[in-house]
Image (cartoon, rainbow, N blue to C red):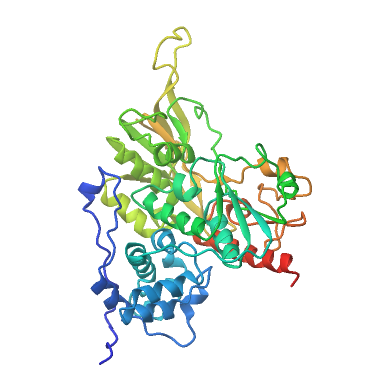
Amino acid sequence: MANLPNMDPKKHEMPTQAPEVRAHNFSEVALGYSEETAIQEALRCLNCKNYPCVSGCPVNIHIPEFISKIKEGDFEGAYQVIQQSSSLPAVCGRVCPQETQCESKCVRGIKGEPVGIGRLERFVADWHNAHAEKLPEKVTSNGHKVAIVGSGPSGLTCAGDLAKKGYEVTVYEALHTAGGVLVYGIPEFRLPKSIVQKEVDNLTAMGVDMETNVVIGKTLTIDELFDKGFEAVFVGSGAGLPNFMGIPGESLKGVYSANEFLTRSNLMKAYKEDPVTPIMKGGKVAVVGGGNVAMDAARTALRLGAEKVYIVYRRSLEELPARKEEVEHAMEEGIDFKLLNNPVEILGYHNPDDRRDPKNGFVTGMKCIKMELGEPDEKGRRRPVAIPGSEFELEVDTVIMSIGTSPNPLIKSTTEGLDVNSHGGIIVEEQAGATTKQGVYAGGDAVTGAATVISAMGAGKIAAKAIDEYLSGK
């Protein structure tokens, strides 16, 4: 007898570590669905004929089809459906903002909660990784060579899609580990690095060559890649150039960009007892910003031993751009949200007469001003306005700036004929990812500035399709 639909208006809760436990370790917070829970959640899907959820997915995963496989208990079949569209299902199931994408289109969300599509995708990918007996096989070469700059989500997706078509793909990564922002930017407690490595291993099994410690623009230029025999190049170098506020005191010791702070912790293992790359630990920490990266930095600081962590954000809770789940987890862990506040100066200890003083030039606090919300800006968000005379000081030892990043200018500065916009993003054709330089394509944060993992993956898919059409003469 077929399973009957589950008409429960609420999605099944995701099991998690208790807040008081997880705040002191780097193990993954979310523990994942069991097989039974996954089947019950899948039964909430109505298998709509027009598939509204698919329209909300940047990589167009066949969502009702993979969920139908889960209903039948065919978890491997569900994985095979997902991997037709996504090269990184275990990653997407963890870090994609499904609530504003596929789940926002779910019919079940009209009178209740949408189907837990992201949680089901994670379950399927984890089930496959735990039970798969062999890696993917390499496709017979079609004789064409493509270079990928950057091993983040857009680069890995583009590489995977091209490798499936028989292209000889080489990925060049500036750091010593493949994975890009998935490795250096997202903490272990949200995305275990073993998960990323598994996805990278799948690509190398398909014949993708991963070359690390190669900085395109320094070690090799784009033009030199063509000289080496590559017929097309995809630039997915991300947005690794941090933004700062330009307020007094940002050069003090103890002020980090979120990029640097997270890279030191995630990639350089600064949390170890005797790290090669140290990091400020303990004390009181202020993280300026309200996005997912700010949440990651704040929760990492807590796990590194901070006695108090603040999120300082100039708008209200309703305007926080971070995922609701990440904000809730941060609050549960005891992070203090200083909303409607904005830094105006970072304070520090400074004695120019005593250069030997180890405290010289260190952060001692942060001066903030209270804000109120005024008229909406061009994006529809109410503009924060400072309240005169409301300044106050926050006692902190470390300040982490998480107010966005910009594309690194290195590739543009070393490549003739590659046009960028006023924000440093590479200019591309929207439907193809083609740049102003023939044979060069781009996508992800290198084009848009900092955005989501899944949107970068979508750009990688678009470029892979365009590269295939370009090189095959279609």
Residue 133 placed where, x, y %? 36, 65
The answer to whether residue 228 is seen in the rendering is yes
Residue 55 placed where, x, y %? 52, 75
Q: Residue furthest bottom?
A: 1
The answer to whether residue 340 is seen in the rendering is no
Give 463 or 473, whichever is nearer the viewer. Answer: 473
Q: Residue furthest top?
A: 353
Q: Is residue 436 above or below residue 218?
A: below
Give the image quarter of residue 1. Answer: bottom left
Of the 4 image quadrants, the one containing the C terminus is: bottom right
Residue 442 placed where, x, y %? 65, 56
The structure residue drawn at horizontal position 51% and vertical position 27%, both measured from the top left corner, is: 251
Residue 51 horizontal side relative to residue 108, left or right: right
Q: Residue furthest front?
A: 140
Q: Is residue 227 above or below residue 135?
A: above
Label tally: 0
The structure residue drawn at horizontal position 34% and vertical position 63%, both measured from the top left corner, is: 126
Residue 151 placed where, x, y %? 54, 51
Q: Is residue 213 above or below residue 61?
A: above
Give 185 or 228, whichever is nearer the viewer. Answer: 228
Q: Is residue 48 above or below residue 164?
A: below
